[in-house]
């Protein structure tokens, strides 16, 4: 296709000699033609990716696509990378100019500058990727911590993750105690003869001194997640159900402009009222308990009297009464325990929530190792498209850098200018793709 | 053999149009690109007057991007000084990519206009205003939202049952 072969001089005397002359169908070298053909397929490749992104971006449920700040995208960094790529486009084109003028030294310097700028771009990209990863934003499960909906599944995922964390911490504490325990036991052996009791005694690690982080995780589990899950499962009020889940999600990973402030306020007054009610109930129950104790003491004294008087009938009756009294006091004690548990949960919630409201960046940011599931509506789709498009672009940048590295040792004079021209064309195309990706990803 | 030959016109070409380009021109294009980048950056600043209608910003940014792309192609990729073959190679590819994006548009329309039951179940939450907070502010005539709400009710019934079985 590129070089058509034409018979120019046909020997009519039958010597069978065909003299062929080269006539290119397009007035450009083969290498450049191939590169342009490749670039035209690349246009379609990236148009497909960008088109799919636009479909998914604008087809997402209205108002759900994450804002750049919700997924830790910083416009300034994106703009800086745009600037870096534009600069590198200029340097490579200046390198080509220098090569055409046979100034191979200057051309090499420009090429080196382009190479370094490309590396800078990839470095910035790596920093950006790392910041996503550190926030639990990955393109795929199981590493991705993103949940599209704040529903009961989400709340139970938070509970499971907390349980996992607490179990791991406990195991760590126990293994730490196990390593220190034998030493302590040895010291005891040396100091005094071991008694049977000391040997049989459970190790101190059975009740590990909870690390502050473990204690915090337990607080979250008992006072926030329990509340969110039970409210979401049992409340009759639909708005309250979703509000509890939204509040949980917001405290873990606050999304811009999504603070359920009114709900928290309402819920706080509700909890305070209920706590006051429970306090009254507990007082009543305690009074009941005291009354029952008094009655039992009375019955007991009556019983001893009956015993000394040897009144068999009265004794039997008193025993029955005593048994009934013990039963009812047990019932009261049970009720009191359950009321006290609920009081504890509510008091804990009322203490925890103002603290959480103070957190500016959410639990996950302040307590990094907890790595709780985060709720970003359409976040998974966002992560897929973001990493796919920037990843393919970064691969193209890396390939360009490889090409630069390969031609860097060559003599870049006018005879080799086509090398710079072709790699330069490719590099400009990579820049061109970023020109579209930057506003689409960082500014839309 | 062909490659040897093919280099020749390239060289001739390279020498022949030596008059084009020039550092000054490239610097000018570079400055234009920087200015255009800051123009698209301007759309997210507080001074941008169309924050209420984001579509204006999107169209503006895409126009700016197309301008930048044209600048890069015309000057940095030397298309301004190339022969007519440039149209053969670039226009069909550009048309194909435009068709590709247009072919995806029915999907966009379809997805925005109606939700399938299945998609609704797994769809992301709408913004917080829809739940609880400012429920009355939400446009109740929007039948899509209504559908969503109805669905929410169904689902919360389900989750209630689920919670009760869990609780007992």
Image (spheres, rainbow, N blue to C red):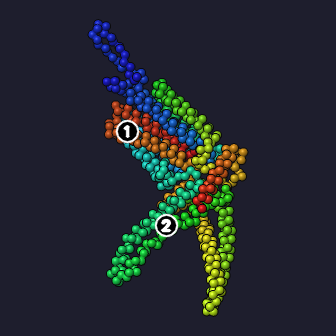
The numbered mark at residue A403 is 1
Neighbours of disc 2 within 10 Å: few (<14), some (14-19), many (20+): some
Q: Position of residue A441 (x, y in %)?
A: 53, 45
Q: Position of residue A161 (x, y in %)?
A: 50, 59
| Badge 1: chain ID | A
Q: Quadrant of the C terminus of chain A?
A: top right
Q: CA distance from mark 2 to mark 1?
A: 52 Å
Q: Secondary structure at mark 2?
A: helix
Residue A75 in view, yes or no: no
Image vertical order of residue A73 relative to residue A366, above or below: above
Q: Position of residue A162 (x, y in %)?
A: 51, 61
First along the sequence among labels 2 and 1 = 2
Q: Position of residue A53 (x, y in %)?
A: 54, 41
Q: Do tag 2 and tag 1 residues touch (Cβ < 8 Å)?
A: no
| Badge 2: chain ID | A
Question: What residue is at 62 percent from the left and 37 percent from the top?
Answer: B109
Question: What residue is at 50 percent from the left and 49 percent from the top?
Answer: A77
Query: As rendered, which of A184 and A314 lies closer to the eye?
Result: A314
Find disc 2 in the rendering and name its residue: A214
């Amino acid at each position: 296709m590129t070089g058509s072969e034409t018979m120019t001089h046909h020997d009519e005397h039958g010597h069978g000699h065909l003299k062929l002359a080269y006539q290119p169908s397009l007035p450009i070298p083969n290498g450049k033609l191939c590169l342009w053909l490749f670039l035209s397929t690349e246009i379609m490749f990236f148009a497909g990716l960008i088109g799919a992104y636009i479909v998914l971006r604008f087809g997402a449920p209205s108002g759900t696509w994450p804002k750049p700040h919700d997924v830790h995208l910083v416009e300034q960094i994106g703009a800086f990378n745009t600037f870096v790529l534009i600069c590198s486009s200029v340097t490579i084109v200046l390198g080509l100019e220098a090569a055409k003028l046979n100034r191979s030294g200057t051309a090499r310097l420009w090429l080196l500058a382009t190479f370094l700028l490309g590396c800078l771009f990839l470095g910035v990209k790596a920093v950006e990727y790392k910041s996503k990863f550190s926030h639990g934003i990955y393109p795929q499960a199981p590493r991705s911590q993103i949940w599209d909906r704040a529903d009961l599944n989400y709340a139970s995922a938070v509970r499971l993750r907390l349980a996992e964390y607490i179990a791991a911490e406990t195991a760590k504490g126990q293994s730490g105690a196990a390593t220190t325990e034998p030493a302590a036991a040895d010291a005891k052996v040396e100091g005094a003869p071991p008694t049977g009791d000391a040997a049989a005694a459970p190790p101190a690690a059975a009740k590990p001194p909870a690390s502050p982080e473990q204690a915090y995780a337990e607080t979250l589990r008992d006072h926030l997640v329990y509340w969110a899950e039970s409210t979401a499962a049992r409340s009759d009020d639909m708005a309250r159900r979703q509000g509890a889940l939204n509040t949980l999600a917001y405290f873990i990973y606050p999304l811009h402009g999504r603070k359920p402030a009114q709900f928290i306020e309402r819920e706080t007054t509700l909890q305070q009222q209920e706590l006051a009610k429970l306090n009254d109930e507990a007082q009543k129950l305690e009074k009941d308990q005291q009354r029952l104790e008094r009655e039992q003491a009375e019955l007991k004294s009556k019983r001893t009297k009956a015993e000394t008087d040897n009144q068999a009938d009265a004794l039997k009756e008193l025993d029955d009464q005593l048994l009934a009294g013990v039963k009812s006091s047990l019932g009261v004690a049970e009720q009191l325990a359950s009321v006290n548990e609920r009081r504890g949960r509510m008091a804990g919630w009322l203490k925890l929530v103002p603290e959480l409201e103070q957190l500016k960046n959410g639990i996950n940011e302040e307590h990094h190792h907890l790595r709780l599931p985060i709720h970003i509506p359409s976040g998974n789709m966002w992560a897929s498209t973001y990493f796919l498009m920037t990843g393919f672009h970064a691969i193209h940048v890396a390939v360009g850098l490889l090409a630069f590295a390969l031609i860097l040792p060559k003599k870049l004079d006018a005879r080799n200018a086509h090398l710079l021209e072709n790699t330069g064309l490719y590099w400009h195309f990579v820049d061109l793709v970023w020109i579209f990706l930057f506003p689409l990803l960082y500014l839309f | 053999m062909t490659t040897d030959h093919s280099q020749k016109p390239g060289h001739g070409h390279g020498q022949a149009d030596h008059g084009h380009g020039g550092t000054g021109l490239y610097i000018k294009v570079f400055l234009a690109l920087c200015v255009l980048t800051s123009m698209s950056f301007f759309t997210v600043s507080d001074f941008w007057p169309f924050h209420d209608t984001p579509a204006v910003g999107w169209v503006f940014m895409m126009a700016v991007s197309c301008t930048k792309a044209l600048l890069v192609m015309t000057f940095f990729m030397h298309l301004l000084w190339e022969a007519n073959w440039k149209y053969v190679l670039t226009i069909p590819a550009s048309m194909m990519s435009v068709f590709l994006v247009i072919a995806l548009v029915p999907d966009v329309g379809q997805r925005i206009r109606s939700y399938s039951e299945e998609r609704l179940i797994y769809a992301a939450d709408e913004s917080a205003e829809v739940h609880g907070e400012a429920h009355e502010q939400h446009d109740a005539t929007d039948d899509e939202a209504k559908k969503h709400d109805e669905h929410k009710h169904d689902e919360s019934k389900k989750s209630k049952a689920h919670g009760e079985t869990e609780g007992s």
